Image (spheres, helix red, strand yellow):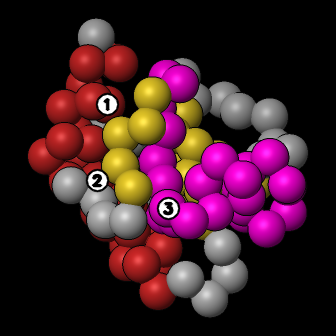
Amino acid sequence: MQANGCDWVDSRTPGTVNMTLVFYTRTGCHLCDVAKEELDRICRRIPFRIEVRDVDEDEAWANQYGDEVPVGVLDGRKIFKYRVDVRQIERALRATKA
């Protein structure tokens, strides 16, 4: 799904954008909904792909991130959990893009 510069996809969709943030979430998570809105705003300035992974669909994801959602991982590095720090994410995206 394309929204405001973001390429929101589930974990089974092949990507076309170079930068991919893996977004660990779960249904009914209010903080996840807030994080998604923040990520949408960031995408308006810095386009990137967001791969959505519902932690309740995979035992390994649930074990690793289930108590921390929402979680954002960029380039194998956790860049946020619980809440989105817009400046921190933008810095990480720009560093990855460079």
Rounded to the nearest angstrom, the CA distance separating label 1 from label 2 is 10 Å
Q: Which mark is residue 32?
A: none
Mark 1: amino acid: Leu
Q: Is residue 51 magenta?
A: no
Distance from label 1 to label 3 (Cα)?
21 Å
Q: Amino acid at mark 2?
A: Ile
In percent of the image, x 31 and y 31: which residue is there?
93
The answer to whether residue 72 is magenta is yes
> Residue at coordinates 49% horizontally, 23% vertically from top-left?
75
Q: Mark number for residue 42?
A: 2
Q: Position of residue 7 (x, y in %)?
A: 57, 49
Residue found at x 35% / y 18%: 96
Label 1 environment density (alpha carbons within 10 Å; few <14, some 14–19, many ≥20): many
Q: Quadrant of the C terminus?
A: top left
Residue displayed at 19% across by 42% down:
88
Task: Examine the rendering and report whether any part of residue 19 can be seen.
Answer: no
Crowding around mark 3 (Cα neighbors within 10 Å: few <14, some 14 to 19, many 20+) is: some
Quarter occupied by residue 17: top right
Give the mark nearest the N terminus, 1 or 3. Answer: 3
Residue span colored magenta: 53-76
Residue 89: percent from left, percent from top:
27, 42
- Secondary structure of the residue carrying numbered label 3: loop
Q: For mark 1, give the secondary structure.
A: helix
Indicate which label's residue lies in the foreground, 1 or 3: 3
Q: Position of residue 10 (x, y in %)?
A: 75, 54
**Viewer-nearest residue: 29 or 4:** 29
Is 40 left, or right, of 10 in this rendering?
A: left
Residue that carries the numbered disc 3 in the rendered image: 68
Kindly identify the amino acid type of the residue bearing the numbered disc 3: Glu
Give the residue number, with chain letter if any, for mark 1.
93
